[in-house]
Image: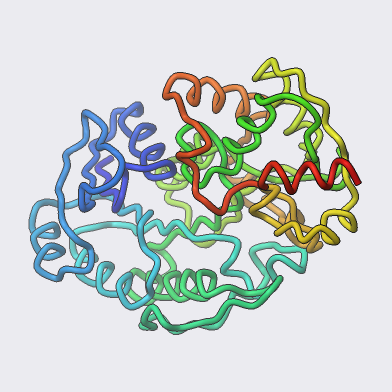
Amino acid sequence: MRLLVLGGSLFVGRGIVAGALARGWGVTTFNRGRSGTDLPGAEVIHGDRWNRADLERLAASGTWDAVVDVSGYVPQNVLEVASVLEPSAGRYLFISTLSAYRGWPIEALSEESPILECPPDADDTFGEDVKDGPSRYGYQKAGCERAVLKVFGPERSSVLRLGVVLGPEEYVGRLPWWLLRIAEGGRVAAPERPDRSIQPVDVRDVAEFALTALDRGLDGAFNVAGSGEATFGDLLESCVEATGADAELVWTPSEVLTAHGVRQWNELPLWRTTPGTWNVSSAKARAAGLTTRPIADTVHDTWTWMTETGLTKDRLPEEMGIASEKERRILDR
């Protein structure tokens, strides 16, 4: 199989490229060459997906069994990209998000749940951010899905709606922050209770399912999330084990965290009180071949990658993690 990956140098895209190469597939990547690194073995074409001439140059360079779009965020642009590449590609697989659902993160979700209303030709101003509700990012991704369907049709389109993705090379910083904080040792403010179910998915499992979907010619949309068997306790206890730290997890009620003004999702990564955050059905994807590894494996492999690369807190996004003084006030309450 010949694959064209739009992006392909970071995290999910890089994982898909690595998995495709391991299967012996031919892989072309198209990106600006400004972030991440291209994997050896892939044909690399540098260009800007917002530049029509670059897209036409790409389309003229070959034909592919499938396009995997990891870098599409604006419907208007995805519509143009898909239109230019359609004569050169058999299928278009778009990497979307659970945020595209109208009910996320409030309601339980399946693929039958409605997605947000956004036209396939919307520009980057469409949508709005609503506290504990829809986001502009979600609106835009929903419009991108419609753009792909408009050009390739339902029988040549695949959409993967990803939940929280963790694993080696994660640049968002959620799991790396927890690992680095726990590695410091001492008392650690942990959110809510240890038996709270969570549904993150390993980046390598995402990549493997994307390739399975292409190999089997799967049409339609699929939620790609953890099984729900893992808990917050499993996650953080695995961090303690992986780092070998002398850390004590202090499980702290949401009411206390809220009273201290802790920002959900970022200051204590992955903590969110809305009921739909970790209530996503991935049964359709599992029936089609999705398998997910234990959270402990993801944690241990991420810590190995971090120690090998020397990742430190100052290299994480600024908004990720709680300040030590604020955490101390919570622990000393």
The number of numbered badges drawn on the structure is 0
Up-down: is 117 above or below 195? Answer: below
Is 175 or 115 nearer to us in this picture?
Answer: 175
* Residue 247 x, y percent position in the rendering: 77, 24
Q: On the picture, is 29 further left or further right than 286?
A: left
- In which quadrant will I find the N terminus? top left
Q: Residue at x 33, y 70 (%)?
A: 78
Is 94 or 321 nearer to us in this picture?
Answer: 321
Q: On the picture, is 119 further left or further right than 44?
A: right
Figure quadrant of residue 158: bottom left
Is 210 or 8 nearer to us in this picture?
Answer: 8
Q: Residue at x 38, y 62 (%)?
A: 156
Q: On the picture, is 20 further left or further right than 213?
A: left
* Residue 148 x, y percent position in the rendering: 38, 69
Render colour scheme = rainbow
* Residue 66 x, y percent position in the rendering: 30, 52
Figure quadrant of residue 107: bottom right
* Residue 128 x, y percent position in the rendering: 55, 81
Q: Residue at x 42, y 50 (%)?
A: 217
